Amino acid sequence: MIKKYSYGQPIETSAVVTDIPAEQDEIQALNLIRSDEGNLFLTYFMEEDDVVYGLGEANRGINKRGYIYESFCSDDPLHTEEKRSLYGAHNFLIVSGMVNIGIFVDTPSQVQFDIGYTAKNVLKITPSDENFKLYLIEGNGAYDIVRQFRKLIGRSYIAPRWAFGFQQSRWSYCNEDEIREVVKNYRDNHIPLDAVYMDIDYMDGYKDFTVSEERFPHFREFVSEMKQQGIRLVPIIDAGVKIEEGYDIYEEGRYYQLFCKRPDGSDFVAGVWPGKTHFPDFMNTNARNWFGSKYQKLLQEGIEGFWNDMNEPAMFYTEEGVREAKEYLKGFDFDNIDAGNFFQLTDMIKGLANRRKDYESFYHNMDGQIVRHDKVHNLYGFNMTRAAGEAFEHLQPDKRILLFSRSSYIGMHRYGGIWTGDNQSWWSHLLLNIKMMPSLNMCGFIYSGADLGGFGSNCTEDLLLRWLAFGIFTPLMRNHTALGTRNQECYRFGNSEMFKNILSLRYSLIPYLYSEYMKACLHDDMMIKPLSFDYPDDDLSRHIEDQLLVGESIMITPVYEQNAIGRYVYLPEDMLFVRFQSPSKRSCCVMHKGIHYIPVDVGEVPVFIRQNKMLPLCRAVECTDLLDTSKFELIAFTDKEMEYIMYEDDGFSKNYDAHENLVSFAITENDGQLGAVSSKTIVKLSLFH
């Protein structure tokens, strides 16, 4: 059951697609309080054993209890434990215990969630603006609340099937020959690959929707050349538009008044990659339609996917900030830099980027309503991606285009996926990736993943192997790293065979992963879940955060510690343990409910198949275009008749709900023996019980 409450005059966020009349009575489940300082906040008193789920792309664990979080989309690559806000703002959480309640605070401005940080058993939610909508969801457990919420906010974005292939990125591959070399090395080593990303250096002067003629002189032909090798090129699109006379995007945006404004009506200016830029006013329908139409420039070159970046919006500086710094430096005593003024100096320089003060200094025209940016800050990246997603419906209506973003708000999940931003090559960020995935699923972001191996810092071979061994289960599987760091393409390390084996397993798993992804999207469900969602009566499962359920059939137990030779796992029921060295080389054994230690060598992938479930595998290939989904190997753990329904389509059109998209694999009993039947060819059945 969902109840809606409305306070003040909320700004429409478009997060919710289901119209629910607002309640007139007082909130019973939460206390609405005005403090002595005049601030409005909500409180909920938690029981000792309550677990708090949600908040999507947030720091720390699956259980958010015990810390303080802030919804304010932030460009900060150092995701250390004390950070309260990351790139996304996902204001949905669930308090789960004897009583289960879901809470969605629908407001585009900053919100603080104090979840037992100040007082252990008190959840305190403080919106920075008193104009908001509040949704309260009652349900039979956390999982039931998630499914109700997912129906409230609408169907998740559906990616093309090729986007489930492995993808290679680096800031930056600067020209055609560098990309050719990357592709050649993957193909020569027979390591699967489906896409190569083009970071900011493919552009002409970092200008959106341009391609450098010097570095990519025959771009359309090059895109075609790559596609003939099974490779899609995926360019980046940034939020800032370079200020340059003669640049058509700049000239049009200025002429039609489509950029964000200063209070005096002039176009707001901030420094980003190209230098001084204007920000398109994505809160404005005309600006969204205009900017979205520009993706056609690259679509007509053969491009089939994009990643939107720098859309918090990220700012290196503003003219106002630079002026203030200059004034400060005029009186600075450079002859006597002591402990006090040294830190003042460094804070001044570091503080030029992404200043909250600057976010309060420009405005949007929300179709006639003038709104200061900080009041709608969390909607900016959402609406940039919305601009692209809506444009694709007109530009290529029958085709799925890959699209994901860095900044997001609930509702953007209908237009694109997300990646979790500029992480680091740290073991702690592998663990953070593991814990973040189910929380993102709760908020509708099913097509998601992290920069495998880490974006910043230098990756090691064992870290990348372990991260890939987890990443093969995330829909977005992209290796991405920063300029100035160690190259971390999979062929750069000593034993390319281990990388080949892990990535080949990904391709054998794609039919299953794609099927579970599609079912989650089409039925407003989750693909990646915490154990407690399927084992709600198992108390220990409520506290397991480093094991995840992927689809209906499997549990994964990634290794995430340096030099580890294995790990402890908890089985909430008897399961079949499959240790993959490659798609075809593996060992299997039945393990009983309880706690076990399992050895897992670097290069191995541990998978547990649940009771009365099966895992279909296809033959490994080097790109998704070569997948043969007419023949399967089945691994099943059952002693009774059972069925697995696999979703399968052409991977690029939008005929999602066709009956012929469903394929059944069944285990039946004949003459006292269990065997498999299917409309597909079963090459091999491995049956365990």
Image (cartoon, rainbow, N blue to C red):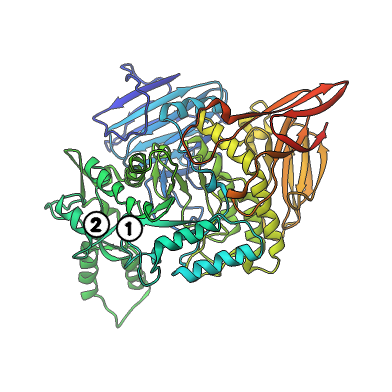
Residue 30 seen in the current view: no
Q: Please, is residue 380 above or below residue 429 in the view?
A: above
Q: Mark 2 — residue?
A: 249
**Which residue is at 60% across, 30% downward?**
533
Q: Nearer the viewer, residue 687 or 648?
A: 648
Tell whether 441 sits left or right of 406. Answer: right
Which one is earlier in the sequence, the residue at label 1 or at label 2? Answer: 1
Q: Nearer the viewer, residue 543 or 300?
A: 300
Q: Residues within 10 Å of mark 2 (few under 14, many from 20)?
A: many
* SS type, badge 2: helix
Q: Mark 1 — residue?
A: 209
Tell whether 117 sits left or right of 205. Answer: right
Quadrant for the C terminus, please.
top right
**Which residue is at 67% across, 52% downward?**
504
* SS type, badge 1: loop
Residue 107 in which image quadrant? top left
Residue furthest out toward the left: 264
Q: Residues within 10 Å of mark 1 (few under 14, many from 20)?
A: many
Residue 40 in which image quadrant? top left
* Amino acid beneath label 2: Ile
Residue 169 picture location, percent across and down = 51, 60
Q: Nearer the viewer, residue 302 or 276?
A: 302
Quadrant for the N terminus, please.
top left
Q: Please, is residue 470 above or below residue 66 in the view?
A: below
